[in-house]
Image (cartoon, helix red, strand yellow):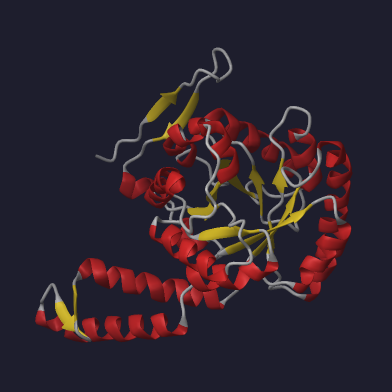
Amino acid sequence: FSRRLNRIVRHPIHKKNTVYHYNTTSFLQQKRNVLETEPVIRSLLFIPGNTPKMLNKMLTLQPDAFVPDLEDSVPLDKKDEARIICSKFINETYASYKKENPSAPLLIPRVNYTEEHFEKDIEAMISPNIYAITVGKTDCVDDVYKAIELLDKYEKKAGLEKNSIKLIPTIESALSICNANEICRVDNERIVGIAFGADDYANDMGFTRNTSQTVETSLVYPRSVIGVTTRSVGIQSFDTPNVNFKDPEGHAEECHAVKEAGFTGKFAIHPNQISVINDQFGVTEEQYQEATRVVEAYEKAASTSRGSLQIEGRMVDQPVLKQFQSIIRRYKRQQSL
């Protein structure tokens, strides 16, 4: 049951004669439980990396994480310029801001996964001031190991401890959905979450997104795959941004559905979306108080040796108790933001 195995993972697009290994240790031993140890990240706000004005303005906002973007929001002819701008912002403006505000939102730059820009982007973004890097268009294990290899290289060059900077691969293609289990189970301490990119996924699948739907039916399957897979290994998952930033009610409904699919947070493209995301993916004071009452009542009645009890009009057994205990832990971690 507990024997450790290394299974060879092969894929047609892997380099010839290259094999990769992922950990298939038993579930109970392998689950990393990032959800209980890493910072709570509900909202992640994209900021185009080639706009100094917008980068500076974002410091007036309070998402859980800022995402200076070198990828899709930057025109092809502005990639090199954006890299310079973001590096300066991270190491000067943000560094100074964080020194005065220790609880400042986390910084998670998004880099390009292209031959021309990938290594340059990672080298430029490596800094003690960032929490993680998110990599777009991660199709398979090969892509994950390439990112890890570069993070190892430039982390060492910058004099940082190994695994100081975390990694959030982005799943946004048919191939990456098929490889989601292997991507999530790469045996490395860097990976703390998975991002979902709906636009590239839709393009790869050959359909146009119907954003008039509050919860798009065409995205139910990939969201389910990502939600279940990330939960199975105890890492976070972040949903694609909602493009209808003037519809807070619809946004809230979508967040609720995505949370029920297993996601722990969501990207934003507009400041108005931050509070909606935080409310939907966070734990409210009311939820915390209810959970506290239920757990305390259950513990007081534990001496009766009963497996289930009726508390405040509902049946509470061990699985339900664990849900309420999780709510309490998440609320306390959320309060430390």
Q: Residue at x 47, y 51 (%)?
A: 216
Q: Is residue 211 or residue 104 the one in the foreground?
A: 211
- Farthest residue to the front: give it: 212
Residue 238's x, y, as percent? 54, 54
Q: How many numbered marks are there?
A: 0
Task: Confirm whether residue 226 shows in the render.
Answer: no
Which quarter of the picture shows residue 319? bottom left
The residue that appears at 74% across and 27% down in the rendered structure is 115
Q: Is residue 283 above or below residue 30?
A: below
Which residue does the image show at 72% across and 31% down from the upper left?
A: 114
Kindly tell me whether residue 16 is visible in this rendering: yes
Q: Which residue in the rendered view is the most extreme toward the top?
A: 17
At a point 59% along the width and 38% down the height, the residue shown is: 200
Rendered-image quadrant of the N terminus: top left
Please determine whether, in this image, residue 315 is positioned above or below residue 172: below
In the image, residue 29 lies at what x, y percent?
A: 35, 47
- Provide residue 62's location: percent of width, then percent of height: 68, 72
Question: Residue 44, image x and y in percent?
Answer: 63, 60
Specify the quadrant of the image occupied by residue 40.
bottom right
State which quarter of the image contains the C terminus.
bottom right
Q: Is residue 104 left or right of residue 78?
A: left
In the rendered image of this protein, does residue 198 appear above or below residue 113? below
Within the image, what quadrant is residue 57 found in? bottom right
